[in-house]
Image: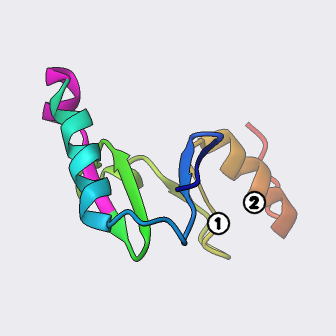
Amino acid sequence: MNVSLEGDEVVIDAGSKISKGDILGALSAFIKSDPDKYDAYRITEFDDVLIIGIPSGHGQLLEDIQQCDMCNYMTKYEEQLRLHKMTHGNVVIG
């Protein structure tokens, strides 16, 4: 079995003789081993990718997002939006 760590990802060779269930079991055991992780972290599956992380609430990612009314450019920061709008010729001073 070829298992390697690449950055923050654990990569398992496709030819390995390990099942997805075994991987999920090991990840679940890891999360359950720490009470802080158990309460906050979840395992999410996307095809052959498993993600361990803290899920965000619905709408949490879009809170406080500033949006350009001309092209739908989005940023979290009002100053960046103001600078962006200058690319459209909408120069706002002040």
Q: What residue type is labelled 1?
A: Tyr
Residue highlighted by disc 2: 85
- Quadrant of the rendered image containing residue 71: bottom right
Please tell me whether residue 40 is drawn above or below residue 34 in the rendered image.
below
**Front disc: 2 or 1:** 1
The residue depicted at 66 percent of the width and 75 percent of the height is: 70
Numbered disc 1: secondary structure: loop
Please tell me whether residue 86 is drawn above or below residue 9 in the rendered image.
below
Q: Which amino acid does label 2 sit on?
A: Lys
The residue depicted at 82 percent of the width and 69 percent of the height is: 88
Q: 71 or 27: which is nearer to us?
A: 27
Whole-percent x, y for residue 33 in the image = 18, 26
Mark 2 surroundings: few (<14), some (14-19) or many (≥20) residues within 10 A: some
Q: Is residue 18 left or right of residue 69?
A: left
Lower sequence index among marks 2 and 1: 1
Mark 1 surroundings: few (<14), some (14-19) or many (≥20) residues within 10 A: few
Q: Is residue 80 left or right of residue 48?
A: right
Q: 14 or 79: which is nearer to us?
A: 14
State which region is magenta. Answer: 34-44
Marks 2 and 1, how far apart in space? 9 Å
Residue highlighted by disc 1: 73
The residue depicted at 23 percent of the width and 29 percent of the height is: 37
Examine the structure image and report whether residue 35 is included in the region drawn in magenta: yes
Examine the structure image and report whether residue 12 is included in the region drawn in magenta: no
Whole-percent x, y for residue 15 in the image = 54, 71
Query: Residue 4 bears which disc, if any?
Result: none
- Say if residue 59 shows up in the picture: no
The residue depicted at 54 percent of the width and 71 percent of the height is: 14
Whole-percent x, y for residue 60 in the image = 31, 50
Whole-percent x, y for residue 86 in the image = 83, 57
Q: 82 or 40: which is nearer to us?
A: 40
